[in-house]
Amino acid sequence: MRYDYEYIRNGVVNIFMMFEPLAARRYISVTDTRTRTDFAHLLYDLSEKYYPHAEKIILVMDNLNIHSLASLYEAFEPQEARRLHERFEVHHTPVHASWLNMAEIEIGVMVRQCLDKRIPTKAQMTHDLYTWMSLRNSASLSVKWHFTTHDARIKLKSLYPKF
């Protein structure tokens, strides 16, 4: 397919992706902005909507400036922020190593399968993303992870303690 060289900007949205590889589940949130408050509401949904009965939710996140549990205190009253904060255990990927994050791989799949075309409206993009998410979730598709502990010890040797 060919497109005219003229670029027409239809708007900008932010896409948050949460991915649970062992359960082959992903959750997407489309927002107008990418702020600490947006991230805090995403954590709220994760806690209250997707995993309300979990004692502890383990998050592996990259080092984006908004990816912090402190975001909860900007969006919610202190008691609610503290309650939510205690539900999460956070592990950050090494700096400059977001490629270790399985969600990054899943985002790549999403981009290739769903966002590889011009999408005229936010409503259409949201619909396409939720349809993609539902299909991937119902088919129980997950990431085929090939990065082993042995590989990590070689590539990340500076992060491992010396014995």
Image (cartoon, rainbow, N blue to C red):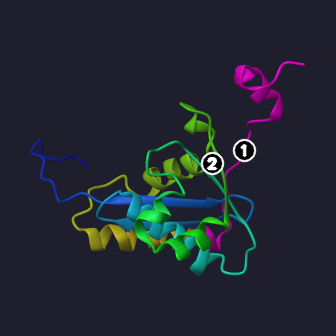
Say which amino acid is labelled 2.
Answer: Met
Q: Nearer the viewer, mark 2 or mark 1?
A: 2
Q: Nearer the viewer, residue 27 or 156?
A: 156
Tag 2–tag 1 contact (CB < 8 Å): yes
For the residue carrying disc 2, how many other residues have a C-alpha within 10 Å: few (<14), some (14-19), or many (20+)? Answer: many
* Residue drawn at (83%, 28%) of the image: 150
Which quarter of the figure has residue 27?
Answer: bottom right
Give the mark nearest the N terminus, 2 or 1. Answer: 2
Specify the quadrant of the image occupied by residue 83.
Answer: bottom right
Towards the viewer: 152 or 124: 152
For label 1, count other residues whose C-alpha is less than 10 Å away and answer few (under 14), some (14-19) or many (20+).
Answer: few
- Residue bearing mark 2: 102
Image point (56%, 61%), residue name: 18
Image coordinates of residue 39 in percent, x first then y, are 45, 61
Q: Which residues are magenta?
A: 136-163
Cα separation, mark 2 vs mark 1, equals 8 Å
Q: Position of residue 17 (x, y in %)?
A: 50, 59
Nearer-the-camera pick, 141 or 77: 77
Furthest-right residue in this view: 163
Evaluate whether residue 134 shows in this view: no
Whether the magenta-drawn stretch holds residue 138 is answered as yes
- Percent x, y of residue 135: 56, 71
Secondary element under disc 1, as helix, strand or loop, is: loop
Q: Is residue 3 left or right of residue 96?
A: left
Q: How many marks?
A: 2
Whether the magenta-drawn stretch holds residue 23 is answered as: no
Q: Is residue 54 above or below residue 147?
A: below
**Residue 104 x %, y %:** 54, 46
- Give the residue type that dot 1 points to: Trp
Q: Look at 9% across and 45% down and name the residue there.
A: 6
- Check disc 1 and report the residue beneath it: 145
